[in-house]
Amino acid sequence: MSTTQKAFYLTTPIYYVNDAPHIGHAYTTVAGDVLTRWHRQRGESVWFLTGTDEHGQKVMRTAHDNGVAPQEWVDRLVANAWKPNWAALNIANDDFIRTTEVRHTERVQKFLQGLKDDGFIYSGKYQGPYCVGCEEFKLPGDLIDADGEKLCPIHSKPVELVDEENWFFKLSAFVEPLLEHYRNNPEACQPESARNEVVSFLEGGVSDLSISRSTFDWGIPVPWDTKQVVYVWFDALLNYATAVGLTDDPDSPGGKKFAATWPADVHLVGKDILRFHAVIWPAMLMAAGLAVPKKVFAHGWLLVGGEKMSKSKLTGIAPSDITDHFGVDAFRYYFLRAIPFGSDGSFSWEDMHARYTSELANDFGNLASRLSAMVEKYCAGVLPAVARDADLESALSTATAKADSAICELDFQGGINAVMDFCKRVNGYVTEKEPWILAKDPKNQQQLEDVLYNTAESLRALAVLLNSVMPATCEILWQSLGAQDVLGDLNSQKIGNVATWGQLPVGAKITKTAVLFPRLELAE
Ligand code: MSP
């Protein structure tokens, strides 16, 4: 029996590189980053994968429209736009997979050959509408009619007619096993509304899936019929498994990685790509005799003007448009705090500005600067005594337990709220104790020191609890509390230990730092 601890394995979708990232893409990736950072701080071994989906007609046509070969186009976008964007947003992914990499293409071919050998692939004729924006074969009932023209409801663009000899995957054979899977494992597709949608889609019956294309060549060649390329979604879904060694010999490094990682614990996806992940992908795995993912979680859309924000509709907002004004950590915080994960939400500068000011600048940033200013003024910058406030201690325990269970359930809003409620509670404590009044009379020295210690200790906990959401800010706070020298790195602090009161020692040096969230004017 293997003794390797299976990693908590989380993936984001791999993004089409027809354009630069917008805040819809960043929403998913930040959520994944927060969740994996949280699990790391729970002491778990974690593997966090993101990457790019580089084949298919959408990417190929964009490259041609820009007068460059597809490979050159994707290389350029990945290097100049995608990777720097994730670095700028402080995304701590463990791996980045590109579907044009040999490690992916070879494993896709091997996997596909295996399905063919086992009788799950046959040749047939495909005729039907196709949306290049979605890279999806559509059913006539999926389309909207605009003066006789059939449009994709997501892209509001005309669909194209595909009429080709292709290879087909026996998807219909997996309807019953999939229904049984979701009946027995309701957590495997979340939220509940997403599972209901998948179940009723399956109950409506599913046809076999065309998994190759013969009219263009930007894709992975079908190994036994190299005039065809693998359908881009069939290719792309496999990234989650090829990145961790799918099809490698069990004794090889890839095979060992696979055993230590698969099945994925969470595939994070937007609701528009739920069916691919909750129907086609597990069916592919079932056909290959592999374990299916433990959870597919479909989040909602960021809306602009009531519609899914998208570059193709010219409503795309680049993450830097927001981070240039509010900073990276406020960006990471805002979307997860403001929108229940699973629901759609509208982005507005006004709402972001209001939350930035009241929750980040006033409640959190101000608490930190008040403490450092008071410790400097009244105690020469050094924590003078250890104290304990039973109410704060119990509020911290409650907040930690609530945050942990909410975040593990992907209820980011609930988790952040639990922590921010504690932050408010600490502000209330400082306001009520009035240390600035206590400081006026030396008789109150002990009380004053207690208040400062309890506030510092609360901020220690806040730095740990908010670290997954706002790592750069929490690091500044950690340094300002003098915690590094006595407790070690912030990232090594465990959630299971955060509510243990009294970790900052007497003598911890509290220093003033830059204001965590400077006051901002509402952007024009
Ligand atoms: N390449 C496929 C995914 C393949 S995964 C095996 C794809 N790429 S995408 O770039 O179009 O979209 C990737 C993700 O971004 C999807 O989960 C999608 O829901 C998400 N978003 C794109 N626009 C969005 C919003 N406006 N709001 C929230 N998420 C959005 O699909």
Image (cartoon, helix red, strand yellow):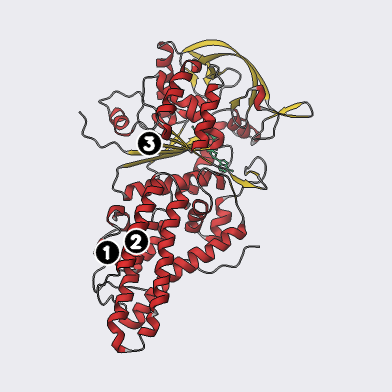
**Percent x, y of residue 412:** 45, 49
**Percent x, y of residue 171:** 49, 18
| Residue contact between numbered discs 3 and 2, judged by CB atoms under 8 Å | no
Mark 2 C-beta closer than 8 Å to ligand 1: no
Residue at the image position 78 percent from the left and 26 percent from the top: 148
Looking at numbered disc 3 in the image, what kind of residue is underneath it? Asp
- Mark 2, residue position: 396
Picture layout, residue 408 above or below residue 240: below
Residue at the image position 57 percent from the left and 63 percent from the top: 354
Q: Residues within 10 Å of mark 1 (few under 14, many from 20)?
A: many
Quarter of the figure that contains the C terminus: bottom right
- Mark 1, residue position: 501
Residue at the image position 35 percent from the left and 57 percent from the top: 398
Looking at numbered disc 1 in the image, what kind of residue is underneath it? Trp
- Mark 3, residue position: 265
The quarter of the image that holds ligand 1 is top right
Quarter of the figure that contains the N terminus: top left
The picture quadrant where one finds residue 471 is bottom left
> Which residue is nearer to you in this view: 57 or 161?
161
Q: Give the CA separation, mark 3 to mark 2.
A: 29 Å
Disc 1 secondary structure class: loop
Q: Give the CA separation, mark 1 to mark 2.
A: 9 Å
- Of label 1 and label 3, which has the lower sequence position? 3
Disc 2 secondary structure class: helix
